[in-house]
Image: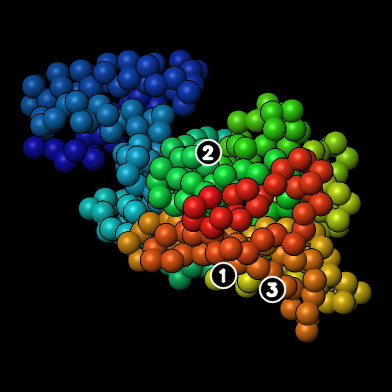
Amino acid sequence: MVGMSDAVRMITEQVRLRVRADSVDLSSDAALAESYVRDELQRYSERALGNALPLIHDEEQAAREAVASLTGFGPLQPFLDDPSIEEVWINSPTRVFVARSGVAELTTTVLSEREVRELVERMLQSSGRRVDLSSPFVDASLPDGSRLHVVIPDVTARFWSVNIRKFSRRIRELHQLVAAESLSRQAAEFLRMCVLAGQNILVSGATQAGKTTMLNALLSAARIRERIVTVEETFELDLRARDVVAMQCRQPSLEGTGEITLRRLIKESLRMRPDRLVVGEVREAESLDLLIALNSGVPGACSIHSNSARDALVKLSTLPLLAGRNIDSSFVLPTVAGCIDIVVHCELDRNGARRVAEILAVTGRVVDEQIEAETLFGRRNGELTALGAAPHKMEKFDAAGLDPMLLLGAGEAA
Protein backbone atom coordinates (compact mmCIF):
# COMPACT_ATOMS: atom_id res chain seq x y z
CA MET A 1 0.00 0.00 0.00
CA VAL A 2 1.37 3.40 -0.95
CA GLY A 3 2.42 5.84 1.77
CA MET A 4 -0.09 8.61 2.36
CA SER A 5 2.42 11.41 1.81
CA ASP A 6 3.57 9.88 -1.50
CA ALA A 7 -0.01 9.58 -2.76
CA VAL A 8 -0.87 13.13 -1.66
CA ARG A 9 2.26 14.42 -3.33
CA MET A 10 1.34 12.73 -6.61
CA ILE A 11 -2.24 14.02 -6.49
CA THR A 12 -1.11 17.51 -5.55
CA GLU A 13 1.41 17.66 -8.40
CA GLN A 14 -1.28 16.62 -10.90
CA VAL A 15 -3.59 19.35 -9.56
CA ARG A 16 -0.82 21.93 -9.91
CA LEU A 17 -0.26 20.90 -13.52
CA ARG A 18 -3.99 21.39 -14.20
CA VAL A 19 -4.00 24.72 -12.37
CA ARG A 20 -1.16 26.03 -14.53
CA ALA A 21 -2.89 24.79 -17.69
CA ASP A 22 -6.23 26.33 -16.68
CA SER A 23 -4.63 29.57 -15.34
CA VAL A 24 -6.65 29.59 -12.14
CA ASP A 25 -5.74 30.56 -8.55
CA LEU A 26 -6.64 28.09 -5.81
CA SER A 27 -4.99 29.97 -2.93
CA SER A 28 -8.17 31.88 -2.06
CA ASP A 29 -10.77 29.37 -3.29
CA ALA A 30 -10.89 26.23 -1.14
CA ALA A 31 -14.05 24.96 -2.88
CA LEU A 32 -12.39 25.04 -6.31
CA ALA A 33 -9.30 23.40 -4.87
CA GLU A 34 -11.40 20.62 -3.37
CA SER A 35 -13.11 20.07 -6.74
CA TYR A 36 -9.75 19.72 -8.50
CA VAL A 37 -8.45 17.40 -5.77
CA ARG A 38 -11.56 15.17 -5.94
CA ASP A 39 -11.13 14.82 -9.70
CA GLU A 40 -7.49 13.82 -9.40
CA LEU A 41 -8.20 11.54 -6.45
CA GLN A 42 -10.82 9.71 -8.53
CA ARG A 43 -8.34 9.28 -11.41
CA TYR A 44 -5.71 7.99 -8.96
CA SER A 45 -8.19 5.50 -7.45
CA GLU A 46 -9.18 4.22 -10.92
CA ARG A 47 -5.54 3.63 -11.80
CA ALA A 48 -4.99 1.95 -8.42
CA LEU A 49 -7.89 -0.45 -9.09
CA GLY A 50 -6.16 -1.39 -12.33
CA ASN A 51 -3.03 -2.23 -10.34
CA ALA A 52 -1.15 0.69 -11.87
CA LEU A 53 -0.75 2.28 -8.43
CA PRO A 54 -1.11 1.05 -4.84
CA LEU A 55 -4.43 1.76 -3.11
CA ILE A 56 -5.00 4.65 -0.71
CA HIS A 57 -6.36 3.47 2.62
CA ASP A 58 -8.13 6.70 3.64
CA GLU A 59 -9.24 8.80 0.67
CA GLU A 60 -10.91 11.50 2.81
CA GLN A 61 -7.69 12.11 4.73
CA ALA A 62 -5.72 12.17 1.48
CA ALA A 63 -8.12 14.76 0.05
CA ARG A 64 -7.81 16.96 3.16
CA GLU A 65 -4.00 16.83 3.02
CA ALA A 66 -3.94 17.68 -0.69
CA VAL A 67 -6.30 20.65 -0.25
CA ALA A 68 -4.20 21.89 2.69
CA SER A 69 -1.08 21.68 0.53
CA LEU A 70 -2.74 23.70 -2.23
CA THR A 71 -4.60 26.36 -0.24
CA GLY A 72 -3.09 26.26 3.24
CA PHE A 73 0.25 25.37 4.71
CA GLY A 74 0.36 21.65 4.08
CA PRO A 75 1.37 19.44 7.05
CA LEU A 76 1.33 22.48 9.37
CA GLN A 77 -2.26 23.45 8.55
CA PRO A 78 -3.87 21.10 11.16
CA PHE A 79 -1.75 22.76 13.86
CA LEU A 80 -2.79 26.22 12.66
CA ASP A 81 -6.44 25.15 12.67
CA ASP A 82 -6.25 23.68 16.20
CA PRO A 83 -7.38 26.41 18.66
CA SER A 84 -5.58 24.72 21.56
CA ILE A 85 -2.19 25.21 19.89
CA GLU A 86 -0.56 28.60 20.51
CA GLU A 87 2.71 28.25 18.66
CA VAL A 88 4.37 26.05 16.04
CA TRP A 89 8.10 25.85 15.37
CA ILE A 90 10.47 23.84 13.23
CA ASN A 91 14.03 23.20 14.40
CA SER A 92 14.73 20.73 11.61
CA PRO A 93 12.57 18.74 9.17
CA THR A 94 12.29 15.94 11.76
CA ARG A 95 11.82 18.23 14.78
CA VAL A 96 8.46 19.99 14.54
CA PHE A 97 7.13 21.30 17.86
CA VAL A 98 3.87 22.85 19.06
CA ALA A 99 2.95 24.57 22.31
CA ARG A 100 -0.30 24.17 24.23
CA SER A 101 -0.85 26.35 27.33
CA GLY A 102 2.82 27.28 27.27
CA VAL A 103 4.00 23.63 27.25
CA ALA A 104 6.10 22.39 24.31
CA GLU A 105 5.35 19.09 22.56
CA LEU A 106 7.40 17.27 19.90
CA THR A 107 5.02 16.21 17.12
CA THR A 108 5.24 13.15 14.87
CA THR A 109 5.30 15.36 11.76
CA VAL A 110 8.31 14.72 9.51
CA LEU A 111 9.08 17.02 6.59
CA SER A 112 11.75 17.21 3.94
CA GLU A 113 14.11 20.18 3.63
CA ARG A 114 12.39 21.04 0.35
CA GLU A 115 8.96 21.01 2.02
CA VAL A 116 10.17 23.41 4.71
CA ARG A 117 11.47 25.85 2.10
CA GLU A 118 8.27 25.60 0.04
CA LEU A 119 6.13 26.20 3.14
CA VAL A 120 8.10 29.31 4.05
CA GLU A 121 7.87 30.65 0.48
CA ARG A 122 4.10 30.13 0.53
CA MET A 123 3.79 31.85 3.93
CA LEU A 124 5.75 34.85 2.70
CA GLN A 125 3.75 35.28 -0.53
CA SER A 126 1.05 37.51 0.95
CA SER A 127 3.54 39.65 2.92
CA GLY A 128 5.80 40.64 0.05
CA ARG A 129 8.82 39.90 2.27
CA ARG A 130 11.71 37.61 1.46
CA VAL A 131 14.39 35.48 3.08
CA ASP A 132 17.68 34.72 1.33
CA LEU A 133 21.44 34.85 1.86
CA SER A 134 21.41 38.65 1.76
CA SER A 135 18.54 38.78 4.27
CA PRO A 136 18.73 35.60 6.39
CA PHE A 137 16.11 36.77 8.92
CA VAL A 138 12.49 37.63 8.22
CA ASP A 139 9.49 38.67 10.29
CA ALA A 140 6.11 38.60 8.57
CA SER A 141 2.40 38.28 9.25
CA LEU A 142 0.33 35.38 7.94
CA PRO A 143 -3.13 36.12 6.46
CA ASP A 144 -4.82 35.22 9.78
CA GLY A 145 -2.62 37.64 11.74
CA SER A 146 -0.20 35.03 13.11
CA ARG A 147 3.45 36.06 13.24
CA LEU A 148 6.12 34.23 11.24
CA HIS A 149 9.83 34.37 12.03
CA VAL A 150 12.39 32.54 9.89
CA VAL A 151 16.18 32.19 10.11
CA ILE A 152 18.19 30.31 7.49
CA PRO A 153 21.77 28.96 7.21
CA ASP A 154 24.52 30.01 7.54
CA VAL A 155 23.10 31.97 10.49
CA THR A 156 21.61 28.69 11.70
CA ALA A 157 23.94 25.70 11.77
CA ARG A 158 22.26 23.53 9.12
CA PHE A 159 18.45 23.70 8.87
CA TRP A 160 15.91 26.45 8.43
CA SER A 161 14.43 27.61 11.74
CA VAL A 162 10.74 28.52 11.50
CA ASN A 163 8.52 29.91 14.26
CA ILE A 164 4.81 30.70 13.97
CA ARG A 165 3.22 32.61 16.85
CA LYS A 166 -0.50 32.10 16.33
CA PHE A 167 -2.79 35.08 16.70
CA SER A 168 -5.60 34.48 19.18
CA ARG A 169 -8.94 36.12 18.48
CA ARG A 170 -10.49 34.67 21.62
CA ILE A 171 -9.60 37.60 23.87
CA ARG A 172 -10.32 41.10 22.65
CA GLU A 173 -11.65 42.96 25.68
CA LEU A 174 -10.78 43.49 29.33
CA HIS A 175 -13.78 41.58 30.64
CA GLN A 176 -12.54 38.50 28.75
CA LEU A 177 -9.22 38.75 30.59
CA VAL A 178 -11.23 38.84 33.82
CA ALA A 179 -13.12 35.71 32.74
CA ALA A 180 -9.79 34.03 31.96
CA GLU A 181 -8.57 34.95 35.48
CA SER A 182 -5.70 36.96 34.03
CA LEU A 183 -7.00 40.13 35.61
CA SER A 184 -9.26 41.01 38.55
CA ARG A 185 -12.49 42.88 37.87
CA GLN A 186 -11.30 45.81 40.00
CA ALA A 187 -8.02 46.07 38.07
CA ALA A 188 -9.87 45.79 34.74
CA GLU A 189 -12.16 48.70 35.65
CA PHE A 190 -9.17 50.77 36.76
CA LEU A 191 -7.37 50.11 33.46
CA ARG A 192 -10.54 50.98 31.54
CA MET A 193 -10.61 54.29 33.41
CA CYS A 194 -6.93 54.87 32.53
CA VAL A 195 -7.63 54.38 28.82
CA LEU A 196 -10.63 56.73 28.92
CA ALA A 197 -8.51 59.34 30.72
CA GLY A 198 -5.80 59.20 28.06
CA GLN A 199 -3.11 57.78 30.33
CA ASN A 200 0.12 56.68 28.63
CA ILE A 201 0.37 52.95 29.29
CA LEU A 202 3.46 50.75 29.07
CA VAL A 203 2.74 46.99 28.88
CA SER A 204 5.73 44.87 29.93
CA GLY A 205 6.52 41.18 30.22
CA ALA A 206 8.62 38.32 28.92
CA THR A 207 8.14 36.57 25.58
CA GLN A 208 4.69 34.90 25.35
CA ALA A 209 3.43 36.66 28.48
CA GLY A 210 0.45 38.14 26.63
CA LYS A 211 1.61 41.71 25.99
CA THR A 212 -0.06 42.04 22.58
CA THR A 213 -3.30 40.55 23.90
CA MET A 214 -3.25 43.06 26.76
CA LEU A 215 -2.68 45.96 24.35
CA ASN A 216 -5.61 44.81 22.23
CA ALA A 217 -7.85 44.53 25.28
CA LEU A 218 -6.83 47.92 26.63
CA LEU A 219 -7.49 49.67 23.32
CA SER A 220 -10.93 48.07 23.07
CA ALA A 221 -11.87 50.43 25.93
CA ALA A 222 -11.00 53.56 23.92
CA ARG A 223 -13.80 55.93 23.00
CA ILE A 224 -15.47 55.13 19.70
CA ARG A 225 -14.61 58.49 18.13
CA GLU A 226 -10.88 58.17 18.78
CA ARG A 227 -8.52 57.95 15.81
CA ILE A 228 -5.87 55.34 16.64
CA VAL A 229 -2.62 54.97 14.69
CA THR A 230 -0.63 51.76 15.29
CA VAL A 231 3.02 51.21 14.38
CA GLU A 232 4.59 47.71 14.40
CA GLU A 233 7.50 45.71 13.02
CA THR A 234 4.91 43.30 11.59
CA PHE A 235 1.16 43.46 11.97
CA GLU A 236 0.03 41.79 15.20
CA LEU A 237 -2.51 44.13 16.78
CA ASP A 238 -6.09 43.61 15.65
CA LEU A 239 -8.17 46.57 16.76
CA ARG A 240 -11.90 46.80 16.19
CA ALA A 241 -12.08 50.57 16.60
CA ARG A 242 -13.97 52.59 14.01
CA ASP A 243 -11.05 54.83 13.00
CA VAL A 244 -7.76 52.91 12.87
CA VAL A 245 -4.66 53.26 10.70
CA ALA A 246 -2.21 50.35 11.01
CA MET A 247 1.36 50.61 9.69
CA GLN A 248 4.27 48.17 9.63
CA CYS A 249 7.95 48.37 8.73
CA ARG A 250 9.38 47.43 5.36
CA GLN A 251 12.55 45.54 4.54
CA PRO A 252 15.14 47.04 2.20
CA SER A 253 15.07 45.90 -1.42
CA LEU A 254 17.73 43.72 -2.99
CA GLU A 255 19.55 46.95 -3.85
CA GLY A 256 19.49 47.97 -0.17
CA THR A 257 16.95 50.78 -0.67
CA GLY A 258 13.36 51.40 0.39
CA GLU A 259 13.65 50.34 4.04
CA ILE A 260 11.06 51.88 6.38
CA THR A 261 11.92 51.70 10.09
CA LEU A 262 9.87 52.09 13.24
CA ARG A 263 11.53 55.46 13.82
CA ARG A 264 10.28 56.70 10.46
CA LEU A 265 6.78 55.36 11.06
CA ILE A 266 6.47 57.01 14.47
CA LYS A 267 7.47 60.35 12.96
CA GLU A 268 5.02 59.91 10.08
CA SER A 269 2.21 58.92 12.46
CA LEU A 270 2.29 62.37 14.08
CA ARG A 271 1.25 63.86 10.72
CA MET A 272 -1.85 61.65 10.65
CA ARG A 273 -3.92 63.41 13.33
CA PRO A 274 -3.77 60.60 15.91
CA ASP A 275 -5.90 60.76 19.03
CA ARG A 276 -3.83 57.85 20.32
CA LEU A 277 -0.50 56.42 19.14
CA VAL A 278 0.28 52.75 19.72
CA VAL A 279 3.70 51.17 19.17
CA GLY A 280 3.48 47.39 19.18
CA GLU A 281 6.88 46.95 20.77
CA VAL A 282 9.88 49.20 21.47
CA ARG A 283 13.26 47.52 21.22
CA GLU A 284 15.81 50.09 20.14
CA ALA A 285 16.26 53.78 19.35
CA GLU A 286 12.62 54.19 18.28
CA SER A 287 11.90 54.52 22.00
CA LEU A 288 13.27 58.07 21.77
CA ASP A 289 10.81 58.98 19.01
CA LEU A 290 7.98 57.47 21.04
CA LEU A 291 8.90 59.54 24.10
CA ILE A 292 9.06 62.70 22.00
CA ALA A 293 5.62 61.89 20.55
CA LEU A 294 4.12 61.27 24.00
CA ASN A 295 5.76 64.43 25.27
CA SER A 296 3.93 66.36 22.56
CA GLY A 297 0.60 65.54 24.19
CA VAL A 298 -0.52 62.54 22.10
CA PRO A 299 -1.84 59.74 24.38
CA GLY A 300 -0.14 56.44 23.67
CA ALA A 301 0.56 52.85 24.56
CA CYS A 302 3.35 50.41 23.80
CA SER A 303 4.87 47.13 24.95
CA ILE A 304 8.39 46.22 26.01
CA HIS A 305 10.24 43.06 27.03
CA SER A 306 11.20 43.07 30.71
CA ASN A 307 11.30 40.96 33.87
CA SER A 308 9.20 43.33 35.98
CA ALA A 309 7.30 46.60 35.80
CA ARG A 310 10.17 48.56 37.35
CA ASP A 311 12.68 46.90 35.02
CA ALA A 312 10.48 48.10 32.15
CA LEU A 313 10.95 51.70 33.27
CA VAL A 314 14.71 51.19 33.56
CA LYS A 315 14.85 49.67 30.07
CA LEU A 316 12.72 52.43 28.53
CA SER A 317 15.15 54.91 30.11
CA THR A 318 18.13 53.11 28.56
CA LEU A 319 16.99 52.34 24.99
CA PRO A 320 16.82 56.01 23.86
CA LEU A 321 20.58 56.28 24.51
CA LEU A 322 21.02 54.11 21.40
CA ALA A 323 19.75 57.01 19.29
CA GLY A 324 23.07 58.88 19.45
CA ARG A 325 25.82 60.37 21.58
CA ASN A 326 23.93 63.62 22.05
CA ILE A 327 21.22 61.82 24.05
CA ASP A 328 21.96 61.32 27.74
CA SER A 329 20.14 60.17 30.84
CA SER A 330 19.68 63.71 32.14
CA PHE A 331 17.13 64.18 29.34
CA VAL A 332 15.71 60.66 29.15
CA LEU A 333 14.96 59.96 32.83
CA PRO A 334 12.69 62.97 33.48
CA THR A 335 11.07 62.48 30.06
CA VAL A 336 10.13 58.87 30.85
CA ALA A 337 8.96 59.90 34.33
CA GLY A 338 6.81 62.65 32.86
CA CYS A 339 5.43 60.72 29.87
CA ILE A 340 4.65 57.24 31.19
CA ASP A 341 1.70 57.10 33.57
CA ILE A 342 0.90 53.41 34.07
CA VAL A 343 2.92 50.18 33.73
CA VAL A 344 1.06 46.87 33.38
CA HIS A 345 3.35 43.85 33.83
CA CYS A 346 2.25 40.48 32.39
CA GLU A 347 3.73 37.10 33.18
CA LEU A 348 3.53 33.48 32.07
CA ASP A 349 3.48 31.22 35.12
CA ARG A 350 4.95 27.72 35.38
CA ASN A 351 1.60 26.17 34.44
CA GLY A 352 1.39 28.14 31.21
CA ALA A 353 -1.24 30.61 32.50
CA ARG A 354 -0.92 34.24 31.40
CA ARG A 355 -1.81 36.86 34.00
CA VAL A 356 -1.15 40.41 35.10
CA ALA A 357 1.43 40.36 37.89
CA GLU A 358 1.40 44.04 38.90
CA ILE A 359 0.25 47.51 37.91
CA LEU A 360 2.40 50.55 38.71
CA ALA A 361 1.62 54.26 38.63
CA VAL A 362 4.60 56.52 37.83
CA THR A 363 4.74 59.53 40.13
CA GLY A 364 6.57 61.79 37.68
CA ARG A 365 9.58 62.22 39.97
CA VAL A 366 13.17 61.03 39.59
CA VAL A 367 14.89 60.25 42.90
CA ASP A 368 18.58 59.25 42.99
CA GLU A 369 18.48 58.63 39.22
CA GLN A 370 15.57 56.22 39.63
CA ILE A 371 12.07 56.79 38.29
CA GLU A 372 9.69 56.74 41.24
CA ALA A 373 6.56 54.60 40.98
CA GLU A 374 3.84 53.28 43.29
CA THR A 375 2.50 49.73 43.08
CA LEU A 376 -1.27 50.04 42.72
CA PHE A 377 -2.05 46.34 42.21
CA GLY A 378 0.00 43.30 43.17
CA ARG A 379 -0.44 39.56 43.63
CA ARG A 380 -1.46 38.41 47.11
CA ASN A 381 -2.18 34.72 47.61
CA GLY A 382 -2.48 34.40 43.86
CA GLU A 383 -5.03 37.24 43.51
CA LEU A 384 -4.41 40.59 41.84
CA THR A 385 -5.34 43.02 44.59
CA ALA A 386 -5.38 46.79 45.08
CA LEU A 387 -2.68 47.65 47.61
CA GLY A 388 -4.11 50.96 48.78
CA ALA A 389 -1.76 53.25 46.85
CA ALA A 390 -3.06 56.10 44.70
CA PRO A 391 -1.83 57.60 41.39
CA HIS A 392 0.11 60.84 41.83
CA LYS A 393 -0.67 62.14 38.35
CA MET A 394 -4.33 63.12 38.57
CA GLU A 395 -4.51 65.83 35.90
CA LYS A 396 -5.70 63.57 33.07
CA PHE A 397 -8.26 61.84 35.31
CA ASP A 398 -9.58 65.21 36.47
CA ALA A 399 -9.79 66.53 32.90
CA ALA A 400 -11.81 63.47 31.88
CA GLY A 401 -14.09 63.79 34.92
CA LEU A 402 -12.96 60.43 36.32
CA ASP A 403 -11.98 59.55 39.89
CA PRO A 404 -9.76 56.44 40.21
CA MET A 405 -10.07 56.57 43.99
CA LEU A 406 -13.64 55.32 43.64
CA LEU A 407 -11.96 52.05 42.58
CA LEU A 408 -8.75 52.19 44.58
CA GLY A 409 -9.74 53.94 47.80
CA ALA A 410 -11.41 50.97 49.47
CA GLY A 411 -8.86 48.38 48.38
CA GLU A 412 -10.46 44.97 47.79
CA ALA A 413 -13.86 46.24 48.92
CA ALA A 414 -13.95 48.63 45.94
Secondary structure of the residue carrying tag 2 is: loop
Secondary structure of the residue carrying tag 1 is: loop
- Tell me the crowding category of disc 3: few under 14, some 14 to 19, or many 20 or more residues within 10 angstroms, Cα based: some
The kind of residue on which mark 2 rests is Glu
Give whichever of 213, 135 is nearer the camera: 213
Horizontal and vertical percent position of residue 153: 50, 64
Residue visible at 35% across and 32% down?
68
The nearer-to-camera label among 3 and 2 is: 2
Residue visible at 84% across and 70% down?
334
Labels 1 and 3: the sequence-earlier one: 1
Q: CA distance from mark 3 to mark 2?
A: 29 Å
On screen, residue 13 above or below 293: above
Read off the residue under disc 2: 173
Read off the residue under disc 3: 314
Residue visible at 13% across and 38% down?
2
Secondary structure of the residue carrying tag 3 is: helix
Quadrant of the image occupied by residue 37: top left
Horizontal and vertical percent position of residue 136: 58, 60
Read off the residue under disc 1: 308
Labels 3 and 2: the sequence-earlier one: 2
Residue 225's tag is none
Q: Is residue 412 visible?
A: yes
The kind of residue on which mark 1 rests is Ser
The kind of residue on which mark 3 rests is Val
